[in-house]
Amino acid sequence: MSNTTELSNVDQGAGSGSIADETELAEMVAYQTPRVFAIVLEYLEYGERVGAEIVAWGMALDEGAYVITVDGVNQYLLDAPENALHYLGCRPGTTPRLVWAVPA
């Protein structure tokens, strides 16, 4: 995925509104859509899960990942989505998990 895509044989002027324009733009966006994931903390007692909460959301990009905590206090730009586990799983009695969001 790259940040730009050549639009061949398409009028790139504003407001042209042709179906070809919309179709090519939709295809470009679909191709470049980042994958979304959550960092979930599982609460454990005696090795069994007794609860869980989402502590952060992230987007996997071509060259790394962007993560923000649900409270908006912390933001991370990381080399890989899995690296978020090192920053967000530091509570005793918890296990951090990276969970990929499935499009609705």
Image (tube, helix red, strand yellow):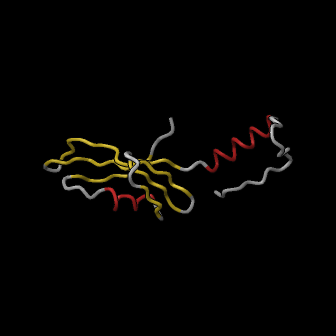
Q: Nearer the viewer, residue 58 or 15?
A: 15
For residue 27, side relative to residue 67 (left or right): right
- Measured from the top left, where is residue 65 in percent x and y? 49, 58
Return the x and y of residue 28 as percentages of the image width and height: 69, 47
Residue at x-position 57% and y-position 59%? 62
Looking at the image, which residue is at 17% across and 50% down? Answer: 47
Asked whether residue 99 appears in the rendered view, the answer is no
> Of all residues shown, which one is farthest toward the front?
73
Residue 103 on image: x %, y % = 51, 39
Up/down of 53 relative to 94, above or below: above
Residue furthest to the bottom: 79
* Left or right: 75, with 52 as reference point: right
Name the residue furthest left.
Answer: 46
Q: Residue at x 35, y 58 (%)?
A: 85
Residue drawn at x 13%, y 49% as measured from the top left: 46
Q: Position of residue 58 (x, y in %)?
A: 46, 51
